[in-house]
Image (tube, helix red, strand yellow):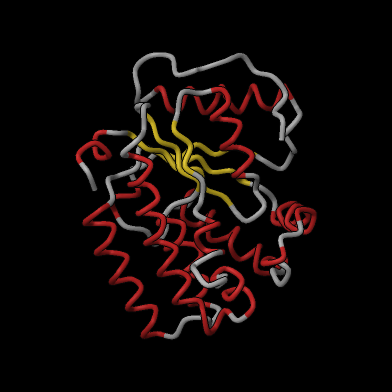
């Protein structure tokens, strides 16, 4: 990681599939002086020669889980570093992270039998090396907590073709993984246990709800300013255009 990126403070928005992370990050970017770094979905969907690795994973997870999860955490680090080099702000906010890759998605894949014991061992070794070598400690996690049933309804509504095979059972397992990691802080590295977590209830839609947006922005702004001096707010609250 470059010296410039090490000096920057970064926070991570975490949450289940369908929790509203992309919309939430867009909202924060509209009202706060932050660099917003979205998940590298397009990179996963177009590896080259028309190959869609995300689609391959969902269609045949047992064949592609190790490949996808390995590429996911490497591409996240590359994506964060590339943005950090051009970041004009003191704060970087990421949509998901290598940590949710490890403690939610990859671990869940192993427990479901999508990765075998050898692949899981190799994944953890790669993960430990990559994080220890290239990742600075996050300042905090912003957990968008939402009921699995609501997440599933949103997933069906947005109707991404790669997610057509995602079940409510799968969403529920991921929900439990997020709670275990971010709330109970079980089974994680000692270094992450001291990282603060802001938990926000995102069961209600907030895209065009001015009051809900205002509350979310105030909560996140206060959380970020515990680590960065000065006001980071950019503009007054108004309904988010999506």
Q: Is residue 18 left or right of residue 119?
A: right
Vertically, is 87 above or below 83?
A: above
Q: Which of 21 and 186 lies nearest the eye of the viewer?
A: 21
Quadrant showing the C terminus: top right
Q: Residue at x 34, y 27 (%)?
A: 90
Vertically, is 59 above or below 41?
A: below
Vertically, is 75 above or below 238?
A: below
Q: Position of residue 196 (x, y in %)?
A: 40, 38
Q: Residue at x 58, y 60 (%)?
A: 176
Q: Position of residue 127 (x, y in %)?
A: 32, 65
Q: Which of 74 and 105 lies nearest the eye of the viewer?
A: 74
Q: Position of residue 16 (x, y in %)?
A: 60, 54
Q: Position of residue 114 (x, y in %)?
A: 52, 81
Q: Residue at x 52, y 74 (%)?
A: 109
Q: How many marks?
A: 0
Q: Residue at x 41, y 38 (%)?
A: 11
Q: Is residue 177 left or right of residue 12?
A: right
């Amino acid at each position: 990681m470059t010296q410039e990126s090490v000096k920057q403070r970064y926070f991570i928005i975490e949450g289940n599939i369908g929790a509203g992370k992309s919309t939430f990050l867009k909202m924060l970017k509209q009202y706060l002086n932050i660099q917003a770094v979205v998940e590298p979905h397009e990179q996963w969907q177009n590896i080259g020669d028309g190959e869609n690795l995300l689609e391959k994973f969902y269609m045949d997870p047992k064949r592609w889980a190790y490949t996808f999860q390995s590429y996911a955490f490497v591409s996240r680090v590359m994506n964060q570093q590339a943005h950090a080099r051009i970041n004009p702000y003191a704060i970087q906010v990421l949509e998901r992270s290598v940590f949710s890759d490890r403690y939610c998605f990859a671990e869940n894949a192993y427990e479901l039998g999508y990765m075998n014991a050898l692949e899981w061992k190799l994944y953890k070794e790669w993960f430990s090396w990559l994080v220890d070598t290239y990742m600075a400690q996050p300042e905090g996690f912003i957990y968008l907590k939402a009921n699995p049933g609501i997440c599933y309804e949103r997933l069906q509504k947005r109707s991404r073709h790669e997610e057509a095979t995602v079940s409510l059972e799968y969403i529920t397992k991921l929900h439990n993984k997020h709670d275990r990691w971010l709330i109970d802080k079980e089974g994680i590295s000692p270094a992450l246990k001291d990282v603060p977590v802001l938990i926000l209830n995102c069961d209600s839609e907030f895209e065009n709800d001015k009051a809900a947006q205002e509350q979310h922005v105030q909560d996140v702004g206060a959380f970020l300013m515990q680590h960065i001096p000065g006001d980071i707010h950019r503009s007054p609250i108004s309904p988010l255009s999506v």
